Amino acid sequence: EGPIPNAYIPIIKTEKNNQQVVTILDGTAVINNGKMIGKLTNEETIGLNVILNNATGGYGIVTINGEKISIEINNSETEIQPTLNGGNLKAHIKVQINSTLADNTSTENIDEEWIKNVEKKMSEQAEHNLKKVLNKLQKDIKTDITGIGLEVIKKYPNEWKKVQDRWNEVFSNATFTIEVETDIIHQGLIHKNREKYQDRPRNNPYKFKREK
């Protein structure tokens, strides 16, 4: 058992599909001291994996002037910068999302200004999702499974010993700031409406990767 007695495991359920029984993911169970004390939805699980730096691949959709734009997420990188002062925790979570445009049918010209607007919308959406999962873990479940505690241990090993026994309380009262930057990799020339950047798979569910 590690220094933080919290864990998370995927929830798997079965259902019938065309008279066949299939297994599907149904969110994430939050574990504290060996007991399930809460659940994250699939959407919240994506946010958790971003914080844990375990997310890779997938799609995001943003709306620009009433049109839905599909973004293919190549990868994301997350850096957590904690500050512990006594029992007061602050942490800055910085996320870099690298992506490309997926199939796009926008009626607008795809120029640099348009790309920057899409990047801004994607960053705002990701920030909202991260705040949502953090708020649920802090205020509802009151349990740290984000890896923030592990970063505190690395940076403040001596101070950690003083808050270890009440870490979930410290986490629940912490202040977090989130910074998301999205880069859309695209061809340098201006592309006119309804052009595709390149052929991409149409079915690519969001993948999860656990670092070893």
Image (spheres, rainbow, N blue to C red):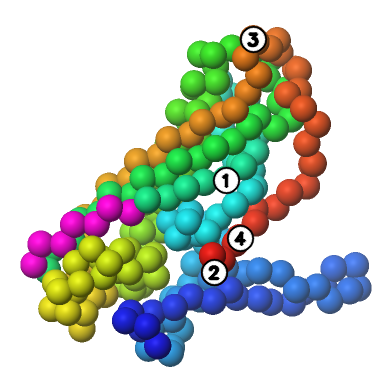
Q: Is residue 53 left or right of residue 106?
A: left
Q: Which mark is residue 212?
A: 2
Residue corresponding to mark 3 = 190
User: If you read the primary sequence from the N terminus, does the residue marked by circle 4 or circle 1 appear first?
Assistant: 1
The stretch drawn in magenta includes residue 81: yes
Dots 4, 1 in contact, CB < 8 A: no
The residue positioned farthest toward the left in the image shown: 86
Residue on which the image places disc 4: 208
What amino acid type should be assigned to the residue bearing mark 4? Phe
Image point (17%, 79%), residue name = 161
Residue at position x 12%, y 68% in the image: 87
Q: Give the alpha-carbon distance from disc 2 to disc 1, as whole Å.
A: 17 Å
Nearer the observer: mark 3 or 2; the answer is: 2
| Image x and y of residue 188, in percent | 62, 14
Point out the tag, 4 or 3, that comes first from the N-terminus: 3
- Percent x, y of residue 28: 53, 71
Q: Which residue is mark 1?
A: 75
